């Protein structure tokens, strides 16, 4: 048969056009419902503008500054030397003979490779992860939580924290109609949660953080959200992000106790997203793990509340997003359900071995008596010190702009300022079929080259508007970015309010 590839009916013996099996009509409707603002339309537009500039096009700016995503290395942060040394040795063991690599890194790499099939990072591991790495994570958690016991068999390595969060939600979502699983999530939230809930056709139960109280979690709001949701679904799980994304708050110990007591009383499964646990900048704040607080509440709580905590290589001081490393610790899960969890994990075989090795270095870093400690400590302190400085700078500059209010960035990697948008601009956005803060962020991008994410992508109270920006650019670039935001905001107010 001779085929004319330019003919759409080519390849059909009857000459008729073959219809596609997968169309927007036949696509899984849950996939259509998924939204992920962090890589949404604003970011696609930013990519178009970047390509236009590369091809010699002209704009009122020379580069796009992407402050939309918490990708530290893309923003110029340098890798932690020791972590890269260990992963390099694991990937290419011939380097063990090189005097350029310290013995501290070599013995860690040898130990990791001994736990891998064929002593190679190219093998599959057991589905929950390499055993020695799981043991290192348990030892790290015990040390972090000042002696609270951690069983390595409760540790599961994951492909970034996102993979663990999705897996646990898959276990929890069941039922139909009014018995369908309700998932309580903070608003504003990280859009992974709303996307996962949409994909699994679960019920999203919003509880609102208190913006006027530095995004604190209000126990009365939890009760309100829970009681309202019970009318149409069965709330089974509460998700907490601490330190907060996009809101940058660090929850107090008292607040965590109240959440855990609420979960105990209402028989809720607790998911604690703790990927920013190393990112605390405010001097009067400190990170408290949900597990440690649960332990301190006594055996009645610690032996019964079902809790999963998540951590990652992507944040903290390492910022190793591309390795896709992470883990979860699972507490008080029914043994039969845990067997089902292992079955679910085995379907995806195992997380990337390089990511597991990177996670091991984070939980087993150089110790003070080791030769590599000095350089490691300097690099870690430098990253965290710069982030603390940038958190303060961002808050100060934004709060000096009329019509912008920014809560202190106590932790994590983001500011989530509230922006005043004049009624005229709100009306224009509605006429264009978009959210007012989407209009604002698109204008900001097109006029200044700055890419931030509209608050509507994270959720916010009605008639309030925000955007999320990372504090990851260098101090110099961050100063430029914040100056441009200030100038843009003032001209935006003038344009739509006639304000001088």
Image (tube, grey):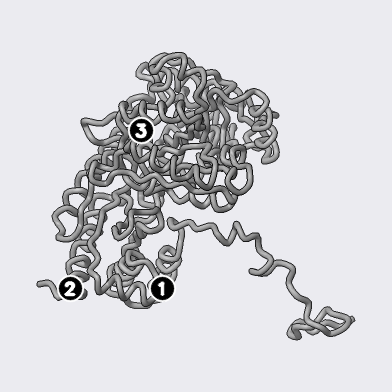
Check disc 1: other Cα within 10 Å, few if <14, some if 14-19, many if 20+. few
Q: Element type at marker 1? A: loop
Sequence-first disc among 3 and 1? 3
On the rendered image, what quadrant is the C terminus found in?
bottom left
Q: Residue furthest left?
A: 500
Mark 3 or 2: in front is 2
Question: What residue is pinned by disc 1?
Answer: 433
Q: Nearer the viewer, residue 99 or 496?
A: 496
91 vs 381, left or right, is right
Mark pair 3, 1: CA separation: 40 Å
- Vertical side of 233 occupied by 423: above or below: below
Q: Quadrant of residue 216?
A: top left
Q: Residue at x 52, y 43 (%)?
A: 182
Q: Residue at x 52, y 52 (%)?
A: 195
Question: What residue is pinned by disc 3?
Answer: 278
Q: Which mark is residue 139?
A: none
Q: Position of residue 388 (x, y in %)?
A: 25, 39
Disc 3 to disc 2: CB gap under 8 Å: no
Q: Which mark is residue 497?
A: 2
Disc 2 to disc 1: CB gap under 8 Å: no
Q: Nearer the viewer, residue 75 or 482?
A: 482
């Amino acid at each position: 048969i001779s085929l004319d590839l330019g003919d759409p009916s080519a390849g059909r013996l009857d000459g008729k056009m073959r219809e596609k099996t997968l169309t927007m009509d036949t696509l899984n409707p849950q996939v259509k419902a998924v939204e992920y603002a962090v890589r949404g339309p604003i970011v696609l537009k930013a990519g178009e503008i970047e390509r236009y500039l590369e091809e010699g096009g002209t704009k009122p700016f020379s580069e796009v500054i992407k402050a939309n995503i918490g990708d530290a290395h893309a923003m110029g942060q340098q890798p932690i030397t020791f972590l890269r040394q260990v992963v390099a040795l694991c990937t290419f063991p011939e380097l063990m003979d090189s005097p350029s690599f310290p013995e501290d890194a070599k013995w860690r790499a040898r130990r990791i490779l001994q736990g891998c099939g064929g002593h190679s990072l190219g093998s599959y591991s057991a589905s929950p992860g390499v055993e020695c790495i799981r043991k290192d994570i348990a030892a790290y958690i015990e040390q972090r939580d000042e002696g609270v016991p951690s069983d390595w068999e409760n540790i599961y390595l994951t492909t970034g924290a996102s993979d663990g969060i999705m897996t646990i939600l898959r276990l929890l979502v069941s039922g139909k109609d009014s018995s369908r699983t309700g998932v309580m999530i903070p608003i504003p939230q990280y859009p992974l949660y709303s996307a996962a809930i949409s994909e699994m056709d679960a019920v999203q139960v919003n509880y609102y953080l208190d913006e006027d109280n530095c995004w604190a979690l209000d126990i009365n709001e939890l009760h309100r959200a829970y009681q309202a949701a019970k009318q149409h679904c069965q709330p089974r799980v509460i998700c907490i992000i601490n330190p907060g994304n996009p809101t940058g708050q660090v929850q107090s110990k008292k607040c965590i106790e109240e959440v855990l007591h609420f979960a105990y009383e209402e028989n809720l499964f607790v998911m604690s997203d703790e990927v920013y646990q190393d990112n605390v900048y405010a001097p009067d704040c400190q990170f408290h793990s949900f597990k440690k607080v649960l332990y301190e509440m006594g055996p009645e709580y610690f032996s019964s509340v079902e809790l999963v905590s998540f951590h990652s290589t992507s944040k903290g001081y390492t910022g190793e997003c591309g390795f896709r490393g992470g883990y979860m610790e699972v507490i008080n899960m029914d043994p039969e359900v845990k067997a089902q969890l292992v079955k679910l994990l085995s379907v995806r075989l195992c997380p990337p071995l390089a990511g597991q090795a990177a996670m091991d270095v984070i939980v087993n870093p150089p110790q003070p008596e080791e030769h590599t400690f000095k350089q490691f400590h300097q690099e870690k302190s430098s990253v965290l010190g710069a982030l603390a400085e940038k958190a303060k700078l961002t808050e100060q500059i934004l709060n000096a702009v009329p019509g912008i209010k920014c809560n202190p960035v106590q932790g994590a990697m983001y500011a989530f300022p509230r922006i005043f948008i004049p009624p005229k601009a709100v009306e224009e956005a509605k006429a264009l079929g978009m959210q007012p803060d989407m209009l604002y962020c698109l204008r900001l991008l097109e006029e200044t080259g700055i890419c931030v994410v509209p608050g509507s992508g994270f959720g916010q109270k009605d008639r309030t508007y925000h955007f999320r920006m990372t504090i990851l650019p260098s101090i110099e670039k961050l100063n430029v970015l914040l100056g441009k935001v200030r100038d843009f905001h003032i001209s935006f107010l003038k344009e739509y309010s006639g304000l001088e």
